[in-house]
Image (tube, rainbow, N blue to C red):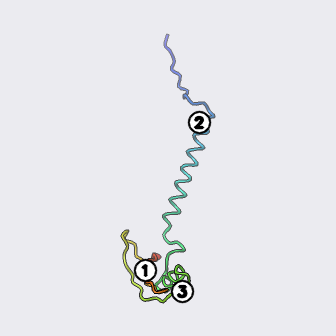
Amino acid sequence: MQRRMNTHSQFDDTSKTALHSWLVTVCASVLLAGLLFSAPASAADAANRQHAIQMALQQNGGDGKVLGVKTVQNKNGQTVFAVKVLSNGRVRVFRIKKAR
């Protein structure tokens, strides 16, 4: 007489349901994170040179004298505006990402 192998998994239905819920949650979290970090342009990106100047002055507290603006490539190959601002005797350079 041949023995039949038990093809039923070692997990019961409750464990399978819990595992499935966990996997769905993890996958949804990963997809959401991917969407958030891969957005082509965000509100923090400057559409043009004037917008970059406004953003830099805002980040500096709303005041300062703009000494110059250059369009440069950062280490990641992205185009950024380097806005040089004089305020309270200090010169600061704000790097504002250019919108695509």
Q: Badge 3: how crowded within 10 Å, few (<14), some, or many (20+)?
A: some
* Residue furthest out toward the right: 14
Per the image, the residue denoted by label 3 is: 63
> Percent position (x, y) of residue 25?
58, 49
Dot 1 amino acid type: Val
Per the image, the residue denoted by label 1 is: 93
Residue at 52%, 81% in the rendered image: 60
Q: Badge 2: how crowded within 10 Å, few (<14), some, or many (20+)?
A: few
Dot 3 amino acid type: Asp
Please report whichever mark, 1 or 3, sits nearer to the chain's N-terminal start.
Answer: 3
Per the image, the residue denoted by label 2 is: 16
Residue nearest the viewer, comparing 75 with 61 = 61
Q: Nearer the viewer, mark 2 or mark 1?
A: 1
What whole-number distance in Å separates the C-alpha atoms at marks 3 and 2? 60 Å
Residue 74: image quadrant is: bottom left
> Percent position (x, y) of residue 30?
52, 54
Relative to 7, 70 lies left or right? left
Residue at 50%, 59% in the rendered image: 34
Q: Which mark is residue 58?
A: none
Dot 2 amino acid type: Lys
Please report whichever mark, 2 or 1, sits nearer to the chain's N-terminal start.
Answer: 2
Residue at 55%, 27% in the rendered image: 8
